Amino acid sequence: MPHLYLRIALLVCLSAARLGWAQQQPAPPVRRIIDVHLHARAAADYGPTPPPNPVSGRVPAYRTDAEVVAVTLAELKRHHVVRAVTSGSQPRVAAYLAADPARIIGALDYPDNQHAPLPDTATFRRLFAEGQFRVFGELGLQYEGKTLTDPALEPYLAICERRGIPVALHTGLGFPGIAYNDCCRNFRTRLGNPQLVEEVLIRHPRLKLQLMHMGYPYLAETKALLYIYPQLYADISVTNWILPRAEFYSYLQALVTAGYGQRLLYGSDQMAWPDAIGLSIESVEKAPFLSEKQKQDIFYNNAATFYGLR
């Protein structure tokens, strides 16, 4: 019996010690996050019923356009996303801006999901002056078989360079089978190579350019561009939740090790799936090779510098 009492006493002491240790651990930081790659979606964009998230399997809990906005904003708030660069057709971006003007930064998609043409340059300047957009992009030119060197874009890039408007360019890949889709018959993987932007950077040395999806899978080309062109930044969107985590970590760590940790921007690229915001944040939080300082740079500091939000 004395041995039983001794064992109970030891267990109580160990439990108390563990509890005390747990209470002394610092709480996870409450971050301020800037999402540089959010989409203003509508309920019907993916058909009458939204498909399940290909990673989490969750079906989005919305059925109307107003519910899409509400659910997306709720996810942003829950994860402490204080600003979100939100692209889409002008009416859809306007709905997000109206719902939360302090959080949403409007961006001008081209081509947008309503197949609207680019506004003429005078309208482009006016829309920017009115605050209807602050970022030119996402430019999904690859889906139409084009690149940033398309001559039709040159006057817009000149305006962006003069006025300090960041340009956000889709690079890398798309969904499997995208080139067989009626909307994207001209999609080619080679057109996602970020190396194709170099002549634009030469012509516009003060242009602020954001490589979306951090140029994945063109790692060597992305490193070369970041090395030569200091005005170039890269966002880590979609790769941070759609790829196997080991693959994402391998690519991200290579860029951080190469010295570009202060040129990487957090983005979710949530598309139809608001829960992708949490998935993408978690993957960065759990990256074992990132210091606390590097995480905060990716989540907030780098974007604040790039977009002039300080």
Image (tube, rainbow, N blue to C red):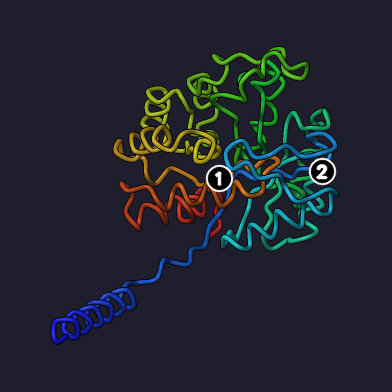
Q: Are marks 1 and 2 in contact (CB under 8 Å)?
A: no
Label 2 environment density (alpha carbons within 10 Å; few <14, some 14–19, many ≥20): some
Residue 279, given in percent of the width and then of the height, sits at 54, 48
Residue 43: assigned label: 2
Amino acid, disc 1: Gly
Residue named by callout 1 = 267
In screen coordinates, is 299 left or right of 86? left
Instruction: Locate the N terminus and report the quarter of the image it occupies.
Output: bottom left
Residue 194, given in percent of the width and then of the height, sits at 50, 24
Residue extending farthest left:
3
Identity of the residue drawn at 22% across and 77% down = 14
Residue 83, given in percent of the width and then of the height, sits at 61, 57
In screen coordinates, is 233 left or right of 224? right
Residue 264, given in percent of the width and then of the height, sits at 44, 43
Residue extending farthest front:
1
Q: Is residue 27 above or below residue 225?
A: below
Q: Is residue 36 above or below residue 98?
A: above
Q: Is residue 267 above or below residue 121?
A: below
Task: Please tell me which residue lies in front, 20 or 308.
Answer: 20
> N-terminal of the two: label 1 or label 2?
2
Identity of the residue drawn at 53% across and 25% down = 172
- Under tag 2, what secondary structure? helix
Amino acid, disc 2: Ala
Identity of the residue drawn at 34% across and 78% down = 23
Identity of the residue drawn at 84% across and 45% down = 91
Q: Distance of mark 1 from mark 2, alpha carbons?
A: 21 Å
